[in-house]
C-alpha cells in the first residue's frame, strides 16, 4: 500500500474524528481501531514526514558529479551543485550515500547558465535593464534500479532576478546567490524522484 499525503491526511482526520466520540464508546472502539490503523499503516511502502515515498527495498543512493557543460558560470559551480545535491538527499531521506551503483542513481550535467536582462526600462532616450535574470538549466537522469517505471530523464530549470546594478561577476563570487537558484532545481528533482509529486 502506498501512502501519499492526501491518503495519510484523510486517514489522520478520520482518526481524529473517531477520537471525539463519547467516552463510553472510546474504550470499545480504541483497541480494534488501533489494530486496524497499525495494519493499514504497515503497508508495502514507507511514508515519512519529510514527504518521501521510498520502497523499503531501496537502501542506497549514488549521485555522480554534475559536469558544467554550459561554458559559463563560476569554476566551482559543478562541485558546489553536486555537494548541495548530496546534502539535500542525505538530510531528507534515510538512504545511505555511496560512490556508485546505488539502488537510486542520479547523474546529469549543467547545460545552461544564462545571464540576461529581464525587465527593460526606458531612462530618457536609453533602454536599460531594470532587472537581470540568471537562468540555470540542469539535465538529470534518475535511475531506480528496483523499479524502472520510476526512472526518468528530464531538464530542470530555475532562475533568479537581480538588480541591474549587480553584475554577473558579483553574482558569481557570491555562492549564496547561485545557491538560491540551484536549491529550487534540487527540490524539484527530489520531489519528482523520491517524493513522487
Image (spheres, rainbow, N blue to C red):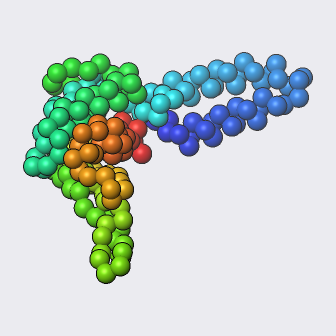
The x and y percentages for residue 66 are 16, 37
The x and y percentages for residue 90 are 34, 24
Q: Residue furthest bottom?
A: 125
In this rendering, the answer to whether 58 lies above or below 112 is: above
In this rendering, the answer to whether 6 lies above or below 98 is: below
Seen at 63% across and 36% down, the residue is: 11
Could one spot residue 155 in this view of the protein? no
Could one spot residue 9 in this view of the protein? yes
Using residue 165 as the reference point, say whether residue 65 is left or right of it. left
The x and y percentages for residue 137 are 23, 51
Seen at 23% across and 32% down, the residue is: 80
Please state, as top left, top right, bottom left or bottom right, where the C terminus lies in the image. Answer: top left
Q: How many marks?
A: 0
The x and y percentages for residue 52 are 42, 33
Seen at 13% across and 42% down, the residue is: 68
Is 32 in front, or is 182? Answer: 182
Seen at 17% across and 41% down, the residue is: 74
Is 97 in front, or is 45? Answer: 97
The picture quadrant where one finds residue 163 is: bottom left
The picture quadrant where one finds residue 78 is: top left
Amino acid at each position: 500500500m502506498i501512502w501519499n499525503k492526501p491518503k495519510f491526511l484523510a486517514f489522520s482526520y478520520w482518526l481524529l474524528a473517531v477520537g471525539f466520540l463519547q467516552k463510553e464508546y472510546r474504550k470499545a472502539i480504541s483497541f480494534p481501531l488501533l489494530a486496524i490503523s497499525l495494519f493499514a499503516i504497515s503497508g508495502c511502502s514507507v511514508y515519512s514526514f519529510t514527504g518521501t515515498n521510498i520502497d523499503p527495498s531501496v537502501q542506497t543512493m549514488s549521485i555522480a558529479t554534475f559536469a558544467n557543460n554550459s561554458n559559463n558560470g563560476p569554476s566551482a559551480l559543478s562541485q558546489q551543485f553536486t555537494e548541495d545535491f548530496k546534502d539535500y538527499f542525505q538530510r531528507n531521506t534515510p538512504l545511505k550515500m555511496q560512490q556508485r551503483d546505488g539502488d537510486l542513481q542520479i547523474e546529469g550535467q549543467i547545460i545552461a547558465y544564462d545571464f540576461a536582462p529581464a525587465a527593460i526600462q526606458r531612462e530618457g532616450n536609453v533602454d536599460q535593464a531594470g532587472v537581470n535574470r540568471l537562468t540555470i538549466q540542469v539535465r538529470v537522469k534518475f535511475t531506480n534500479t528496483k523499479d524502472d517505471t520510476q526512472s526518468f530523464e528530464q531538464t530542470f530549470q530555475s532562475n533568479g532576478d537581480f538588480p541591474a546594478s549587480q553584475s554577473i561577476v558579483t553574482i558569481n563570487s557570491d555562492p549564496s546567490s547561485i545557491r538560491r537558484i540551484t536549491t529550487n532545481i534540487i527540490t524539484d528533482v527530489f520531489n519528482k524522484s523520491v517524493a513522487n509529486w
